[in-house]
Structures are given as C-alpha cells and as structure tokens.
Amino acid sequence: MKPTVLAPRSGLLLATAILLAGCDGPQSALAPAGDGAERIANLFWWMLGGSAVIWTLVLGLAAYVTRFSRGKHSLVASRWLILGGGVVFPTVVLSALLIYGLMLIPALRTPEDVGMRVEVSGEQWWWRVHYPSPDGGGPIELANEVRLPLGERVAFDLLSPDVIHSFWVPSLAGKVDMIPGRTTELIVQPTQLGTFRGACAEYCGTAHALMNFQVVVMEPAAFERWLAHQAEPAQPPRSEIAQRGLESFLANGCGACHAIRGTEADGRLGPDLTHVGSRLGLGADVLPNTTEAFVRWIGHTDRIKPDVRMPAYGMLPDDELAALATYLSELE
Amino acid sequence: MNERNDERHSDDQHKPAARWASLWLITVSPTIWAVHFLLCYVTAAIWCARVVGRNGMLGDARLLIAAYTVVALVGIVLTAWRGYRQHSYGEGSAPHNEDSSEDRYRFLGYATLLLSGLSAVATIFVALSAVFIRSCA
Ligand SMILES: [Cu+2]
C-alpha cells in the first residue's frame, strides 16, 4: 500500500488556507465590516503588496550579483543604483505612503453627518455605555455591549475613570485610547450586518485580557426597537423563584454597586443590570449568558476574573444563587 | 608611530585649524528639523487648546507652520551648501577615507550634506501633515 503523503504543493495550499482562515472572523481587521476598517485594510494590502515587490526586487538583485554577475560592475552604474535605489526610491515610496495615510485621516474623523453619539467608559475591567435616550430624556446607561444601526455614522466619546484602556473593534474601525481626564473620539460607520467582537487593547491591569464586548450591527428599525426596549425599566419577576432572586439581590447589597431600573437597586459602581439577560455575554464577554454562567459568576467571581472589583458570593446557599441567576437571566 | 604623525603635521601646508575637526556643522540640520517639529507641534497644540477648540480648524496655524517650514528649509539648504563646499575642498572624492585632516574635513562636510538631505525630507514630511489635516479633530 502506498503511504499517503501530501505533495509539497498541496501542503502549501493547506498552509495558505489555514492562514487565510485565520484572517476571517468577528474580530479581524482583515475582514472589514465598517468604513474605517475598510480603509485601514486597504492601506494594509497596499503596504503588503508593495513590501512584497520591494522584497523580491532586493533579493533578486542580491541573487543577481552573487550568482549570475559576479565580476566587477561599472562604478558609474553602481553609483546611480545606490543613489536611485537607496535615496530616491525610498523617499518617493515613503512620501507616497505618508500622503496616502494622511489623506485617509480627515475622512475618518470629520464630525459631519454623525447621526448618534454614544459614550463608552472603560473601567477595570468592563465597559460602561451611555446611549442617548430615544425620547430625548437623559442618557440611558447600559454595559458591556454595543449595538449600532447599519450604515449610520456613530461617534463614540471614550472615557476612563481609572487607567488607560483602548477601545478596539477590529472589524469596524481603528483603535482609540481611553485616557483618564480626557474625552477621545472614534467615529464608526458599519457597512455590514453581524456580530463583531471588541476588546480592550491597552494593558490595564490583571484582568485586561478579560475585558471584551460584543458589537451587534442591526437594521435601523430593529436597532430603534432595541434601544426603546433598553430604555425601559426592568420587568418585574415573573415567577416565585425570580421574586426570591430579586429579594436576595436587594438583601445582599448587590444594589450598592448595581442598578436595576424599576427596583430600589441604584448602585453606580458596577455595570447596570436592568437588561443584563439580553446581553450576548456575561462579565464583559468572558462567559456565555446562561443561568449556569450567572451562578458561576456570582459564586466564583474572582476565579473567573482575577482581582475583579466585585466580591464573590460563594457563601450563599445553592438555591439562593440559583434564584439570583434565574432572576437576572430573565432581565431581558 | 608618534614620529609618523609628527611628520605629517609638520608637512601640512595649511595648518589645520581646530575647527577643521569640528563636529558642530553636521548637527545643524537635524537640530533645525527637531526645532521645526517642536514648533509645529506646540503651535498646533496651543491653537487647538486655546484658540479654536478640539473640533476647530487649524486655519491660520497652518500659515505659521508654512512659515516655519520655509525658514527651516532655507536653514537646511544653507547648511547643505556649506557641507557641499567642505566636501569638495581641494581634490579628492568620496568616500574620503584617508587618514589626513583634509579628508576628515571633507568627510564631515559630506556627512553634513547627506544629513541635510535627510533633514529636509523629514521637515517636509512634518509639514505635510498640516497640508492634509485641516482640523484639530
Ligand atoms: Cu485593558
């Protein structure tokens, strides 16, 4: 029997396929789904292509002089080559790249035709989000998830109360730092529907790598419905166990740090939980949004996120944890 | 070895002045580039913070930057010219690698010329940002 050996060519194909597959996905700057990311990806491809050409050229020349034309070269020709290839060519290429790059910036940053402003504050290690109220009232506070209407230019005002974080959704736009004491701005215009992933891109302490969020790009009408729903207070508990969950939430002091609009809980230290059940992930997208995940989060918070600014409630009896989890996961 | 050096020195027709080995000239152009960058930066920063606000237009600050750039380029070209004169002193062409004070002198001139070229390009690159970016945002 012949052993099956991959021909070198198919090995190369396979490697390329794997590499290319790595470029796709919800968190890839090379699979752009927003205006900014498209321009950045274009710049990247131009630079990649250009570098490939220059690399080939330089190695080609090196091969030429070491293998094919080993003799003496004319002094004049060599001098011109050094002047042309070493001085003029790099200057021209770098100028072209600089001008191309500079021309990209104004279009990405003009505040014209911005439809909506969303405020996001990076906090160790989660995201506080404020949307403008759909009925013109004060802003609504949400957390750990961002939704955007397809095609609309949205400006993010980026803040931080503690250390420097960086707001990055590679599929949609470039990244911008969140700096204590300042407001920075990022303008995003999604061009595709879908769910994308954002991350903190500046080391901000122990749980930095566990500070992520999901971004959902929706049809404008669906977005309006979502925002109107998020602006509403929490729905009251629908079952007895959920009722016990609410009581436990209030009795254990969770309300000192968390707000659930429509209940007595109005803490501001941690994420707003009014609609926590509607989010795609839990704990800044480190756990799935399931009842079991709520139990794990509340009972073993610091094991899931080291140094987290929320005490673990592992001392609560199992049925109380289950009640809390049921109540919270139903807050859609 | 000492003897040989002494001989050479006494052979020199034109006594090499101390400035012949001076490094100052080659630092001039990069310094102009650095100062130009700093001035552009500070001007834009003050303009955006105090005059027009963070979403304002650069407006007249761009004229100032243009003026700095012209002055800087004139300085760099003059330096380059002096470097060129020094590089073509007497006879002898690059790479000026003789162990003699003339060749050291020429070498420093040549380095001045090349660094002036680099500084000119860099200064223009700095100014280009004010050409393409018109607003503080
Ligand atoms: Cu971080």
Image: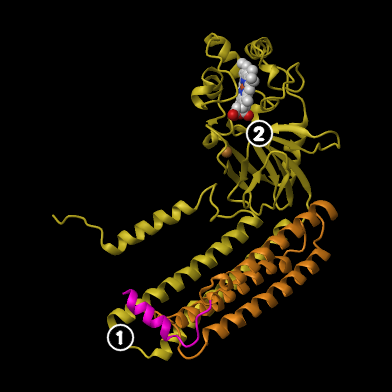
Chain colours: A yellow, B orange
Tell me which numbered mark, 2 or 1, is placed earlier along the sequence.
Answer: 1
Task: Provide the chain ID for the residue under circle 1.
Answer: A
Q: Which residues are magenta?
A: B1-17
A267 left or right of B12? Answer: right
Is there any visible trace of residue B86 in the rendered image?
Answer: yes
Q: Quadrant of the C terminus of chain B?
A: bottom right
Magenta stretch encompasses residue B7: yes
Q: Is mark 1 within 8 Å of ligand 1?
A: no
Q: Quadrant where the N terminus of chain B lies?
A: bottom left
Compute the Cα span from label 2 to label 1: 63 Å
Residue lying at 77% horizontally and 64% vertically, measured from the top left: B134
Q: Label 2 belongs to which residue?
A: A162
Q: Residue at x 42, y 81 (%)?
A: B9
Total marks placed: 2
Residue B78 painted magenta: no
> In this rendering, is residue A161 above or below A269?
below
Image coordinates for residue A259, horizontal then vertical, percent = 72, 22
Q: Which mark is residue A69?
A: 1
Q: Give the quadrant of residue A313.
A: top right
Residue at the spot 83% in from the left edge and 65% down from the top edge: B60
**Residue B20, horizontal then vertical, whole percent:** 52, 77
Q: Nearer the viewer, residue B121 or A131?
A: B121
**Circle 2/circle 1 CB separation < 8 Å:** no
The residue nearer to you, when weighing A165 against A34, is A165
